[in-house]
Every structure is written in C-alpha cells, then in structure tokens.
Amino acid sequence: MTFLVDLFRIVAIVVGTFFFVAGTVGLLRFPDSLTRLHALAKADNIGLGLVVLGLLPLTENVLAAFKVILIWALVLVSGGSTAQLIGRALRSGRR
Amino acid sequence: MTTAALAGLVGAALVGFGLYGLIVQPHPLRKLLAFNLIGSGVFLVFGIVARRGAAAGFPFDPVPQAMVITGIVVAFAASAVAVALIWRLYSETGHVTLDPDAWTEPSRERES
Amino acid sequence: MSVLPFIDIGLSILVVTVAASTIFMQELFAAVVSYVAYGLLLAFVWIRLYAPDVALTEAAIGSGVTGVLLITAGKRLVPLSRTTTEAEPTLTLRVFAGTFAALVACALGAAILVLPDEPPSLAPEAAVAASGAGAGLGNPITAVLISYRSFDTMLEKIVLILAVVAVWSIGTDGAWGNAPAQLRQARPHPEMVFLAQVLVPIGTLIGIHIFWVGADAPGGAFQGGALLAAMWMMAMMAHLTEPPRIDVRWLRLALVAGPAVFLIVGLAGVFMAGSFFAYPPSLAKPIILFIETFMVLSIAAALPMLVAGPPNERPVP
Amino acid sequence: MADLATTTPGGFLLILAILLPVTGIILCFIVGGRHVDRIALGLTPFGLALAGAIAFRVGQSGKPVFYAIGGLPPPLGIALRADGISAVMLVAAAVILTAAAFYAREKFATLDGVRESRGAISFWIMLQAIWAALNIIFVGADLFNLYVALELLTFAAVPLVCMDGRPETLAAALRYLLFALFGSISYLLGVALLYGACGTLDISLLALRVRPTPAVWTAASLMTGGLLAKTALFPLHLWLPPAHANAPAAASAVLSGLVVKGSFFLTLRLWFFVLPALSTEQVAAVLGGLGSAAIIVGGVLALRQARLKLLIAYSTVSQIGYLFLIFPLAAGAHAWSTIGWSAGLMQVLAHAFAKAALFLAAGVLAETVGHDQIVKFGGAARALPLTFLTITLAGLSLTGLPPSGGFSAKWLMLQASIASGQWIWSLPALGGGLLAAGYMYRILTPALSDGKISIERPPKRYQEVIAFVLTLIALALGFVPQSFFDFIEIGRPLAETGLS
C-alpha cells in the first residue's frame, strides 16, 4: 500500500514538474506575448495541481491538506484572472 | 561554502549594484529602486548573522530576524514618502530633477 | 550528497542577475517590474536562511506592497522617463561609481567571510526567555518583537504614522481632508472585480490566520497586517470600496490604534510589573496578543494609505 | 567600566522624556483639527521640565542615569543611558524646540473657519517627532534602537523642508531624503556587522567586546559614512543648503541648530563610547581633515550667496566642520583631550543656539521686508533694530569673538591643538573665524547703510524677542563656570582611565 502511495506521489510530482518546465520553455520560445501567456497560465496551473496532488499524502491532518488545496485554488483564481488582464491590456495596446 | 556565506556574498553584491545605481542613475525613481536593492542586501547581512547564530535548538538567532522585520517596514515607509515627493514634483512641473536650481529662473527654462 | 548546494548557487546567481537588471535596464518601467520579481526571488533566499517570518514579510511588504507602490508610480511616470532633464551620467562618473561600489562590495564580502568562527548569538538567551518568565510565546521572533524589543516595535509604528502624515503633507493645501486618488483611475475590468470579490474575503481570513498563529508559528502582526493591507488595496483597485477621506475619525483611530495601545499597556506596566513596557509573566501572552491585534489594524490601515499617496486635489463627487 | 545597565534612581525620567512627545504625536493625530498647536505648545513646559530634571539627576549623582526598558536589561532588552553630554543636549534641544514652537505658533495656527489645515497638523506633528527622535538619540544605548530614531528624525525633518510645496523645495526635500536614506541604510549595515562580530548592540557591552577585526573596521566605516551623510559633512554637504534655506524659519532653526547635531552626536557616541578600542590617529586625522575642508569650503561658499537664508545655511556647512575637530583634539587618554572634548561640546551648543537665533531673525526679516536678497537690505537695521542686534550678536558667536560660546569653543580648540602638539588644527579654526567674519560683514554692511526699505508687514515683537533670547544664551555660554565642563565629563569612558 505504502509503495503504491509513494509511486503515486513520485509520478504526480515528476509529471507536475514536467508541466512547469514545458510552460517555461513555452515562455522562452513562443513568438508573441499572447501565446507565451497561454503557455505559462495553462501549463503552470496543471503543473502546480499535480504537485499539490503529489504532496497531499504527506500532509499530517485534514486541515493541512485543505490548506495545500487552498493554495492551488488561490493560484488558479489569481493566475487565471491576471492572465486575462494582461491579455486584455495587450490587445488594447495593440489597437 | 555554506548557505549563509553564499547569502552573505549575494548581500554584498546587492549592496554594490545598489550603490552604483544610486550614484549613477539620474532618475529619482531609479535611485529609489537602487536604494531598495541596498536595503535588501543589508537585510540579507542581518539574515546571515541570524543564521550563523543558530544555537540552543533554534536554527537561527531571533534577534536579528526581528530587526529585519522592523527594517523592511521602515524601508517601505521611506519608499512611499519618496514616491509621493517624486509624484508631486512631477505634477507641479511636468518633469523630475533633483537639481534645486532648475526652477529658480522659470522663464529661461521655458524658452530653452 | 544533496542537491541543496546547487539550488543555493543557482538561486544566488538568479537573484544577483535580476538585481543587476533592475539597475541596468534601459526602460524605467521594465526596471520596476524586474524589481518586483527580484523581491519574490529574495523570499526564497530567506527561506533557505531558515527565516520563514522574514520570507513572509519580504514577500508581502518588500515585494508585494512595495511592488504596487512602485508599479503605480512607474506607470504614472512612464512619459517622464523620456522627458527627464538630467544629463546622462558621464563616463568618469560611471567609472568612479563602479570602482567605489566594487570596493564597498568587496570589503563587505570579505568582512562577512571573516566573521568570527564561533558566532556570537542571543539565541540561548532568547530560548531561555521565550520558554521562561519572559513572554510565553512559541515563536521567538514574536517574543523578541513585542517583549524584548517592544520599544523598537512601538517606535517603528510611530515611524509609520509619521510616514503617513509626511505623505499626506506632500499634497496641496486645498486638498487636505479629501480622500487620496483612486488606486486605479479608470473603471476596472470585470476580471479584476471578479478576482477581488473572490480573493478579498479569503485573503482577509488568511491574514487573520497568519496573525493568530504568529504567537507560536511563523507569522505575526506584520505579516498578517500586510496581507490585510493588500486585500484592502485590492478592494480599492476593483472599486469595491472607495479610499476614505483622510480626516475621518475611524481612519485616524485605526492608524494610531497599534502604537496608542502599546503605549497605554507600556505605561500600565509601571503599575503591574514595576517598569515601562514590562508585562506580568502570568499575563504576558494575552497582553501580547491584545497589543498585536491593534497593531494588525494599524498596519492594515497604514500600508494602503502610504501607497494611495497624498489627498486628491479634485475630490471624487 | 561599571556601566552594566540596571535601572538607577530617576531612570524612568529618560523614558518619560521620549514618551511625552510620542504621546503628543498620537494626540495631535487623533484629535487633529484646530487643537494641534495647543496640544504641542501645552506639552513644551513638561518637556523642558523633564530635560531639566534629568540634567539635575545626572549632576546630583555624578554618574550616568540608566533605565532598562521593561525591566529587561541588555543584551536582550533595550537600555537608555543619560550621561553628561546627553543631559546637556536634552536641555538644549528642549529650549530650542520650545523657542521654535512659540515662534511659529501664529504661522501654523489653523485659520478661522477651517476644520483642519495641512500646514498646522504636519508642522506640529513633525516638530514633536523631531523632539522624540532627538531625545532617543541623546539617551539611546542600543544601536538598532538608535537606527529607528534616526529614521524617525528623517521622516520628521524631510516634510518640514517642503512645507510650502514650491518645486524647488520639493526637489530639495527629495534630495535630502535620498541622502538621509543612504545614510541610514549605511549605518544599519554597520549595525548588522557589529552584531555579527560581537553579538550585542548595547553600547556599554559593545565597548567591552569590540576588537579591531576587519568586520568591526568595515562596520565602523559604514556607520561613520552614513552618519556623515546625515550630518552633511563636506563632501556630503550638497543636500543641506537648499533644504535648510527653503524650510519655514522655525523649521530651519530646528534643522540647522539641532537635527544635524543628532547624527553628529551618534558619531561621537560611536567613536568615543563604542569603539575606543579602535580609535586611532588616522581616523581622527581623516575626520579632522574633512572638518577642516568643510570649514573653508562652507565659509567660501557662504561668502558668495545672494540670499540671506542660503548664506546662513552655508555657514552651517562651515560650522559643522568645526565639530569634527573634536576627533583629533579629544582622542585618546591625554590631559589635553579633556580640553578638546570641552571645546567640541561647547561648539555644538554655541552653534545650536546662535544658528537657531540667526534663522529665526532671518525669518522675521524676510517676513517684514518680503524678500531675503542681501543687497536690498539697505536701511533694514534702522527698521528692525532688535533683529539686527540678534544677527550681530549671533554672528559674534559664529565668528568666535568674545564674549560668546563660540569664542570659548574656538579658544579651547586652539588650546587643545597647541597642548597636544597638533597645531595644524588651529589653522582651519582661525581661517574659519575670518571667513565667518567676512560673511557676517556682508550681511551687516548693506543693512547698516542708509536707505529706505519698504516694510510689507510690521515685525512681530515676540518673534524678535525669542530670537534675541536664543542669541543671549549663545553669548552666556561664554561665561559658564568650570563645573559645567566637569558636568559634560560625566560618563565619558576615557575620562576615567585618562585621569588615573
């Protein structure tokens, strides 16, 4: 059982990290600001989600687990909204 | 090399860059940025002093850390006062310079 | 063998590079943005130095609130970065400043590296004090801030009030009493309003939580207060609430609550424990939490007022 | 040194002297409105009384007075410590601040029909903050606590410079702020290193633990550099003239007479109380050399100013130079270092009172004739006899002519430089006197000449009298008895070992 949990943790965190790396590569390699933003927002939200999932078995109690999930939710909300705001600013700037 | 020594060198480098910017950059807002860099470098020095002082079961000496927290708040207040001054100067004159003689003869200023 | 040294070295290089870019960046606004990123990176360095309390403060105040202040200022001043009347620095000045800065940095680096091998520390004293009669708090930093160096902490709150008065006094005579200008002039975008509506209640809860656990865990009045301040600023940016007039009584009371309560409790110490700012050991913890409650209020009120700037010339109708 | 801090009788007076203006700030801020001037003025007698009581306590016991805040002694807690020089400075600050407050009470009163005015509330809060900060600086015994006090002083002094909101005053204030912030952060860096090297920030404990290691030397240089920037010692003086010349007269008097002395006082504390283990002739020579340069450069620039207030401000640059001659003249444990010490402290006091009087008198003059262009002062002395008597007598003290505190200071400096065989320091001291005579002559000649000056507003008699009283104190300092010089030796570390 513990082996399965450990395996799940490792896989989740490694895949999460992969998404982060992919997002960063996108930030550096994509041609314009909107696509860069897209890469960053999408990949990092999923990446963080997987990392949080991988960390969940490590938490000591339900409250701690809740806090870790809350962090993901907050990043999701703020990251998404900021990406929208930046995207809007970019479009109005281009016009 | 320990983390503390490394952070100390980072602190020294930050102070160096900040000092350079403070002297060279003409724009007051950039001088302010440079001042903040120096400030965070100084706080890092407190940080390594605290880390080196780990003893008695604490991973750090709490006294310098408490001082940093006080220092960060004071540095922020200083930035706020400086920004207010820069902004008022800008809205009065349309430009910002630290040269107090720049407005003594406004007529000439306007002609040039 | 661990990977930590490599993480440390990588982080150090990153911090120094971003710091250098804030100085050498051509555009003013880019420099400001780079400074904010730098502040966040610095928070990681603080965590590596086993200073979670400082990391929280640095992230919230050093990077967050200062970032809002500088970005707002930078945005207003963008046209200015091209119209500044100062001449570009001459080569002589650059060489001189570069040499001088390098000398100072080297001297400082050397001085840090040769600090005594058996570092002096007040940690043992603090350990005895925090567990003993002194304060009864689990977080030694909170104990130092509110008990042993309470005088500094109170004075620092006075410095904050003074900074607020200083910022207000930089406005014009006619504007005195008005509210500061909106943190955001135009109507906010719906995304901003949505973000504020979701984040402000949660953030407020988290701020109170950080303050509350600060007695025993990382956190405390400064960090919690800074988070509450950020929430208030966000609400003002989304126009969920307007900045208050600077002469309303509740604002003034909120701003001085921290130092005033600190002062009164300090004076009461003369009668309760025989000395200014002394607390009777049995009551130390409740007294400290009581003082901290008002300090949170003062910090949460002072930081947004410092960011909002002088009162507005033309009051919003 | 038996200086380990436990609270001594009367120690609570020290914290009261700090908390009184702090309470004033809080009250002014909450009550606000039309009462700010009454609160601030109402507290001045108590401030004076506390300063007097502390001086009395120190004189009576003949030993420094201590207070451990919260009953928690250093190294973990913060202590306050008042010795001879602290007591003297506390009294001087109380007198000058009270004088400035009463001088300014009409200018910064809230007009009828106004609920609260920017000028009034800012000025009175800042004035009390300066008082609080100076009191901490004079009695503080913890280097980090002193840093907070330095910042408090900065935040109080800078807004006073740009009270009128004209662009040139805003620029002067901004420049002052940047210099002052640089000064504080440099000082703070030194504090960090000192803590790293010695594990305490209490002045008395540090004095026992300091060893001449690279870290301590770096700390000492950084702290000194920062404090010099705040004291406006040449070549870091650029911010001072525009800042001091543009503030309202009462504020200029406080800034020039007291605020720069705050950071100078800390430089004294640092080298004579914290780092006696370090004090070497080279450091003293560098500080003395910069002081000498300041005396000459400031004096020459003062000679070239067209505006009266700028002239006085440059005179401050020059007179600050004199203060730094104390480092070579009072260094070490010699018989003559006592003379040098007396000379330095006398110069601090004489300049504080004379300069405050001069700025207040210049304020009366500018209000009365509507400008401060020196060449257009023809006939002013006849129109304002008392004010010009004040200017003349204050000039007497600045120049160093008898009978005045300025004369005593410079005379003692000459004595110390000859007794110590460092006669080289008597040259700038004498040269500065000549320059001061020159710039005072430049003010007085046009004013004493015949001419008809247009009076815009009749002078306010009480303002003239306040300035005159400050001048009289500057003169009276020339007659202080020997017991005064014994008093300022109280608690001076080297004095004890030097005599034995």
Image (spheres, helix red, strand yellow):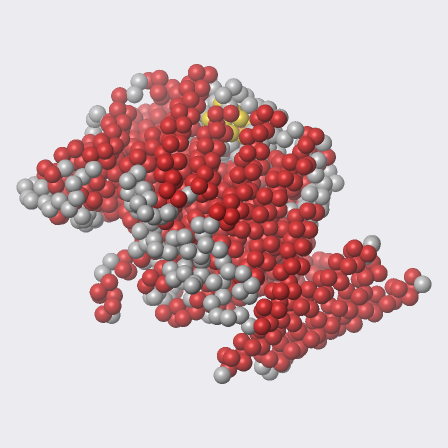
User: Is A47 on the left-hand or right-hand side of A30?
Assistant: right
Identify the residue at the far left of this view: D450
Q: Measuring 44% from the left and 66% from the top, which residue is drawn there?
A: C76
List x then y, in percent, for residue D330: 38, 29
* Front one among D91 and C19: D91
Q: Where is residue D86 in the image (x, y as percent from the top left)?
A: 42, 28
Q: In this view, does D73 lie above or below D251?
A: above
Q: Image check: A6 left or right of C282?
A: right
Residue in the picture at 62% in, 69% down: C194
Residue C35: quadrant of the picture: bottom right
In this figure, what is the number of numbered marks?
0
Q: Which residue is drawn at 57% across and 55% down?
A: C229
Residue positioned most to the right: A1
Q: Position of residue A74 (x, y in %)?
A: 68, 64
Specify whether A69 is left or right of C303: right
**Residue A76 sits in quarter:** bottom right
Task: Tell me: residue C218, above or below residue C9.
Answer: above
Q: Where is residue B34 in the image (x, y as percent from the top left)?
A: 48, 58
Residue C153 at least partly seen: yes
